[in-house]
Image (cartoon, rainbow, N blue to C red):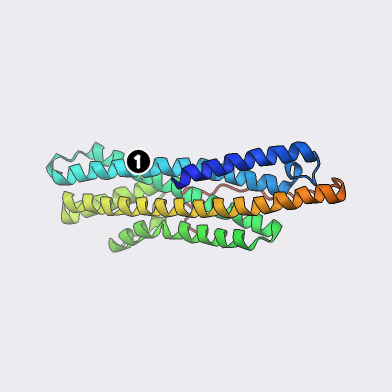
Amino acid sequence: MKNSWTRMMIAGLVAVSMTLSADAGTVAGTGGSTEITQILNNLQLIQSYEQQVQMYVRQGTQVENELKNLMANPTSVLGSDVGNMINTIGSIMNGGQSIGWNLSQIDKNFSSVYKSQPAAKLSTAFTQWHATSTDTLQGALRAIGAQRDQYATNQAALTDLYNHSQATNGTLDSLQTLSQINVRQIQQLQGLQELMSTQATAESTYMASQTAKDQQMNVTQGNLSQPYTAIPAVQTAPSPKWKQ
């Protein structure tokens, strides 16, 4: 429901921005304002990220159902089945962590250029989410005397964790370990969805305020141009970015 509302909100803001742009036609107008354009771009990016996270949640839920079936009959477990699930879980981790990191940098850049306190708070929230999203796997690895930095990928770390658990406590315990990590990951992705919804609401509210100001400026100042302020491009983080 929230995601549908976000899409409707973005569509409405696009229409408003295009209308005001046609009326203004200058950098002073909403359509030419770098700040407004950046917010609109951010909102559209959030919408794209929302769709990706929804896909990750569906994939994680599917893996969880497969794990439940295997735990009900652990003697039927095949290495290829486990390998496929580990690849999927690791891939979802990579995608979610990259999205969280990228959004933290987008808000950081925006807050730096436009001195926006709400954007700075959101940047901190996304950075904290990114750090927390690694905690479950990190904790499981520490329990077997390992560290995430020892492994090149999430998949490699999960494979070693599974093999160690299976050798120590058996197949059922190793499947339960994967399930706990996967369930926690789904919960974290749902938390990321909440953060993105908060970000979309904050940016749309700010954009509505700025469009009104820009429109009024066009009327009172006769479309006088304003300085062009560019926002630094976001550098996509490695997947995952473990070090802050």
**Three-letter residue code for mark 1:** Gln
Left or right placement of residue 66 versus residue 233 in this view = left
Mark 1: few/some/many CA within 10 Å (<14, 14-19, 20+)? some
Residue plotted at (35% across, 58% down): 136
Residue plotted at (17% across, 50% down): 172
Residue 80 image-quadrant placement: top left
Residue plotted at (58% across, 42% down): 10
Q: Residue 148: horizontal and vertical position, in percent?
A: 39, 56
Name the residue that disc number 1 marks: 59
Q: Quadrant of the N terminus?
A: top left
Q: Residue 54: horizontal and vertical position, in percent?
A: 42, 43
Q: 88 or 201: nearer the eye?
A: 201
Q: Residue 242: horizontal and vertical position, in percent?
A: 47, 56
Residue plotted at (35% across, 45% down): 89
Q: Is residue 188 shown above or below 74? A: below
Mark 1 falls on what kind of element?
A: helix
Q: Is residue 67 shown above or below 101? A: above
Q: Residue 182: horizontal and vertical position, in percent?
A: 31, 50
Q: Is residue 97 visible?
A: yes
Left or right placement of residue 65 versus residue 107 in this view = left
Q: How many marks?
A: 1
Q: Is residue 226 visible?
A: no
Q: 207 or 172: nearer the eye?
A: 207
